[in-house]
C-alpha cells in the first residue's frame, strides 16, 4: 500500500473529524473567491473607471481576507491535529519512521485542501452573481449583473490558498518532530485555556458591523471610494471581532446560565 493510499484511507476513516475542518476551508475559499470576483469584475472596474484608489481598496481587502483565512485555518488545523496526536503517537510506537508520518500528514492536508478548494471555487462561482447583486442593491447601484466566471479570480484564489495549504501542511509535517511519544499520547487530556473575552470588544464587533451597514446604504458614485473602503474595513474587522469576542462572550453567558440551572436543580 502506497503512502498516498494510506492518506486516502485515513481521510475516509477520520471523515467526521475532517468534516468540520473541511467545511471551514470551503467557507473561507467561497468568501475569498467572491471578493476576488468583485475585484476582477469588468462591470465594477468600468463603474469605478478612473478611481485607481478603489482598486487598491479591493487588493487590500484581498490581503486582509487572506491573513484572516490563514489565522482561521491555522487554528482549525491545530485543533484537528490535536485530536489526532494519539493516532500519530501509535504510528511512531509501531516503528513508522518520523519522516514517513510527517509526509503522510503533509499529503493528507494537501489532498483535503485541494478538494476543499475545488468545491469552494465551484460554490463561489455559483454564488458570486447573487453576492454581487446583493452588494449592488445594498449600495443602490443600478446595474444588471451578468453571470461571469472570472479566470483571474479563480487563479488568484488558487495561488492564495496554494500558499496557505503549503504553510499549514508544513506545520502538520513538523508535529512528529516537535512532540515526544508521551506528549502525543497525553495531548487529548490536556485542557485548553478558555479564551479571554471582553464585553466592550464583543459589543464593539456589532457596532462596527452596524456602521458598515449604515455607510453601505449611503454609497453612491460621488463617495464610492471612501464609503466602499469603510464598508470593506467594517465588514472584515467586524466579522473577525464577532467570531473572536462576541461568540465567545455568548458561549460564556450560556455556560453560566447552565451552571445556575444545575445548581438550582441540586
Image (cartoon, rainbow, N blue to C red):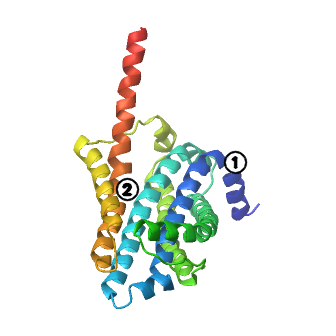
In the displayed structure, does residue 80 sit left or right of residue 197? right
* Camera-side residue of 98 and 244: 244
| Residue positioned 48% across, 38% down in the render | 186
> Relative to 49, is 199 above or below?
above
Q: Single out the mark in the foreground, 1 or 2.
A: 2
The N terminus: image quadrant: bottom right
Residue on which the image places disc 1:
13
Mark nearer the N terminus (1 vs 2): 1
* Camera-side residue of 119 and 188: 119
Whether residue 166 is visible to the viewer of this picture, yes or no, is: no
| Residue positioned 49% across, 46% down in the render | 82
Secondary structure state at the residue bearing disc 2? helix
> Relative to 16, is 5 above or below?
below
Residue furthest toward the left? 200
Secondary structure state at the residue bearing disc 1? helix
Picture coordinates of residue 156, whole percent (x, y): 50, 79
In the displayed structure, does residue 134 sit left or right of residue 63? right
| Residue 141, picture quadrant | bottom left
> Relative to 82, is 154 above or below?
below
* Camera-side residue of 244 and 142: 142
Mark seen at residue 141: none
| Residue positioned 46% across, 68% down in the render | 137
Q: How many marks?
A: 2
Mark seen at residue 239: 2
Q: Residues within 10 Å of mark 1 (few under 14, many from 20)?
A: few
Picture coordinates of residue 110, whole percent (x, y): 59, 66
> Relative to 89, is 239 above or below?
below
Whether residue 221 is visible to the viewer of this picture, yes or no, is: yes
Amino acid at each position: 500500500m502506497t503512502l498516498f493510499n494510506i492518506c486516502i484511507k485515513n481521510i475516509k476513516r477520520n471523515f467526521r473529524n475532517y468534516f468540520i475542518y473541511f467545511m471551514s476551508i470551503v467557507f473561507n475559499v467561497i468568501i475569498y473567491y467572491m471578493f476576488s470576483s468583485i475585484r476582477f469584475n469588468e462591470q465594477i472596474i468600468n463603474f469605478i473607471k478612473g478611481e485607481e484608489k478603489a482598486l487598491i481598496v479591493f487588493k487590500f481587502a484581498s490581503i486582509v481576507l487572506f491573513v484572516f483565512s490563514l489565522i482561521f485555518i491555522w487554528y482549525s488545523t491545530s485543533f484537528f491535529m490535536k485530536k489526532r496526536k494519539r493516532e500519530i503517537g501509535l504510528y511512531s510506537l509501531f516503528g513508522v519512521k518520523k519522516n514517513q508520518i510527517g509526509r503522510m500528514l503533509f499529503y493528507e492536508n494537501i489532498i483535503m485542501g485541494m478538494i476543499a478548494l475545488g468545491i469552494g471555487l465551484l460554490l463561489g462561482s455559483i454564488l458570486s452573481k447573487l453576492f454581487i447583486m446583493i452588494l449592488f442593491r445594498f449600495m443602490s447601484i443600478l446595474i444588471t449583473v451578468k453571470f461571469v466566471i472570472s479566470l483571474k479570480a479563480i487563479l488568484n484564489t488558487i495561488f492564495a490558498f496554494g500558499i496557505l495549504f503549503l504553510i499549514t501542511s508544513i506545520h502538520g509535517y513538523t508535529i512528529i518532530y516537535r512532540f515526544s511519544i508521551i506528549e502525543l499520547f497525553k495531548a487529548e487530556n490536556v485542557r485548553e485555556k478558555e479564551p479571554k473575552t471582553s464585553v466592550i470588544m464583543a459589543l464593539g464587533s456589532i457596532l462596527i458591523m452596524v456602521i458598515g451597514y449604515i455607510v453601505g446604504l449611503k454609497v453612491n458614485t460621488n463617495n464610492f471610494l471612501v464609503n466602499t473602503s469603510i464598508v470593506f474595513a467594517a465588514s472584515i474587522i467586524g466579522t473577525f471581532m464577532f467570531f473572536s469576542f462576541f461568540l465567545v462572550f455568548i458561549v460564556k453567558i450560556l455556560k453560566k446560565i447552565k451552571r445556575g440551572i444545575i445548581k438550582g436543580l441540586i
